[in-house]
Image (tube, rainbow, N blue to C red):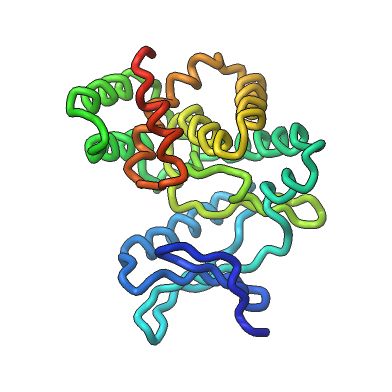
Amino acid sequence: MARELLFERTTKSVYRDGDKAIKLFCKDFPKAEVLNEALISARIEEIGGIHTPITLAVTLDENGCWAITKEYIEGKTLEQLIKENPDKMEEYVEQMVDLQLTIHSKTCPSLGKLADKMVRQINELTEVSQASRSDFLVRLESMETDVKLCHGDFQPNNIIVTTDGTMYVLDWVHACLGNACADAARTYLLLCLIGQEIADKYMDLFCDKTDTDRRYLQQWLPLVAATQLTKHRQEEADLLHKWVAICDY
C-alpha cells in the first residue's frame, strides 16, 4: 500500500502507511521537539486507562527529516461525527467531557508544570504591553495550582472514534500537569472556533460534572488566551485577542 497523505501543515505532514501513521517533520524542525513529543507520548501510554496510539519508532530519513511512527487508528474524528450527526451534538460533547475528566483523573510526575509553561509564554507575549503582561502574571499567581494531567489541546479533531465507539486521544505534545479548569478553558476556546453553541454546551457540562462555578472557569479564559497568542495561529487570533482584551476579571 502506497503512503496516503492524511493532512499537511507548514512544519509537518501525516501519512498513513498500512497499519501505521507517520508524522513527518520539515527538515529544519528542531530535533529536541521531535524527541520530546515522542517521550511525552510514551509516558502517556505508561499511565494506562487512556486510549492513545502506540509510538513505534522515531527515525531520521535520507533527507534529514525526523519522523514519528505510531499505530494507525481506524475511525473518524469526533469533529467529523459532530458534522455528520448534528442532532447528536450534545451526546458527543458529553462523551468528550467524560473523556477529558478521565484524563484529568490521572497524573504523570515526569511531565512539566502547566503554570511554569504559562509564565514563560506570558513573558514571551509581544502583542500586549509590559503592564498587561505583569497583570496577567499577577492573576496567574493567584489561581489555584494542581497536578492533574492536562492534554493542552483537547478538541474534537484530536479524538478518533473507532467503529465500536472507543475514543483514542491524539497529539499529547502540549501535555502538562496543572489545573483542570485551565485545560477546560483551552478546550472552550477551541470549540468557540467551531461554534458558540457547542462551546457553551461544553462549558455547561464540564461545570455540572465537576461542580465548578462557571465564573471560576471563565477567569482562566483571558490567561489561556494570552498564552495561546504566542503560538501565532492565524485562525485563532481574533478570538484570542477578544479574550485577552477582557481585563475586568
The residue shown at (17%, 28%) is 130
How many dots with numbers?
A: 0
Percent position of residue 59, x then y: 43, 77
Q: Is residue 88 left or right of residue 76?
A: right
Using the image, determine if residue 204 lies above or below residue 50.
above
Residue ranking furthest to the bottom: 62
Q: Tell me residue 145's x, y (percent).
A: 39, 26
Quadrant of the image occupied by residue 212: top right
Report the quarter where the C terminus lies: top left
Residue 10 picture location, percent across and down: 42, 63
In the depicted view, which residue is nearer to us: 208 or 242?
242
Residue sitting at x 39%, y 64%:
34
Picture quadrant where residue 248 is located? top left
Give x and y (percent) for residue 164: 82, 54
Quarter occupied by residue 219: top left
The structure residue drawn at horizontal position 39% and vertical position 79%, both measured from the top left corner, is 60
| Quadrant for the N terminus in the image | bottom right
